[in-house]
């Protein structure tokens, strides 16, 4: 959904996502789709967490979780995020119950954030390092940008420097068979656009 993407871009750029959020909710009122509703609630929760508003995030994550269950979709990501919110809100018993439910399937970053929120940095550190390495992928510009940014922030919270990782090596990425033709076509389009 394009409206949700605008919210994400505003949020990633550090801009106020409120106007885009209002437009996204209006768009979903016209054509409500369960998947898009769940994703927008999850995005609202992420924005709330970034501002330290864990109670607001909790409400959105509960809604996203219910919608995901209704779709028969995977609920691990929403459950892990909800557990982290609950831990920040002091509801550690419920957070640990959710942790037990998602431990086998949640991402390392989600688990690291949850352990950190539960006051268990020793359990969070190795998970955060694994998550950073996975987010690095082949190295920028071929890394998971947002995930790498979140992992870097998590390492900072844990007092860890990012691990040394090899930079992207173009020699390890052979050209696809038609890559030269694609680049030539793009150059032609750019030249035509510049001349217009």
Image (spheres, grey):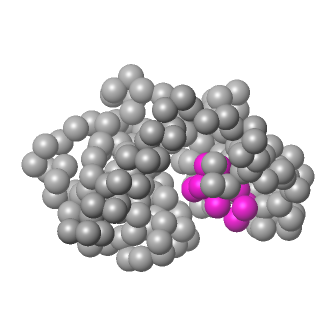
Q: Residue at x 16, y 53 (%)?
A: 27
Identify which residue, 19 or 99, lies in the foreground.
19
Residue 178: x and y in percent read: 49, 32
Segment tinted magenta in the rendering: 143-154
Q: Residue at x 14, y 50 (%)?
A: 29
Q: Residue at x 26, y 56 (%)?
A: 3
Indicate the quadrant containing the C terminus: top left, top right, bottom left or bottom right.
bottom left
Residue 94: x and y in percent read: 62, 43
The answer to whether residue 156 is left or right of residue 90 is: right
Identify which residue, 144 or 112, lies in the foreground.
144
Which quarter of the figure has residue 151?
A: bottom right
Above/below status of 124 relative to 76: below
Q: Residue at x 27, y 64 (%)?
A: 193
The answer to whether residue 94 is left or right of residue 181 is: right
Instruction: Indicate whether residue 32 is drawn in magenta.
Output: no
Residue 181: x and y in percent read: 45, 39
Magenta region, main secondary structure? helix
Identify which residue, 192 or 72, lies in the foreground.
192
Count of picture labels: 0
Above/below status of 87 relative to 131: below
Q: In this view of the protein, can residue 59 be seen by the observer?
A: no
Instruction: Indicate whether residue 147 is drawn in magenta.
Output: yes
Identify which residue, 21 or 135, lies in the foreground.
135
Residue 123: x and y in percent read: 85, 47
Which quarter of the figure has residue 137?
A: top right
């Amino acid at each position: 959904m394009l409206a949700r993407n605008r919210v994400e871009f505003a949020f990633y750029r550090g801009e106020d996502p409120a106007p885009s959020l209002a437009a996204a909710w209006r768009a979903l009122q016209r054509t409500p789709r369960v998947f898009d509703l769940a994703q927008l609630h999850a995005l609202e929760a992420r924005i709330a967490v970034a501002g330290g508003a864990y109670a607001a995030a909790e409400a959105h994550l509960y809604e996203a979780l219910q919608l995901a269950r209704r779709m028969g979709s995977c609920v691990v990501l929403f459950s892990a995020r909800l557990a982290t919110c609950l831990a920040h809100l002091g509801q550690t018993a419920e957070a640990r119950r959710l942790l037990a439910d998602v431990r086998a399937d949640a991402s390392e970053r989600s688990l690291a954030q949850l352990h950190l929120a539960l006051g268990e940095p020793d359990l969070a550190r190795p998970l955060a390092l694994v998550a950073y390495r996975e987010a690095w992928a082949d190295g920028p510009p071929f890394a998971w940008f947002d995930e790498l940014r979140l992992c870097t922030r998590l390492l900072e919270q844990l007092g860890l420097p990012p691990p040394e990782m090899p930079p992207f090596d173009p020699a390890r990425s052979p050209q696809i068979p038609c890559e030269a033709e694609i680049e030539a076509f793009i150059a032609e389009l750019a030249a035509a656009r510049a001349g217009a």
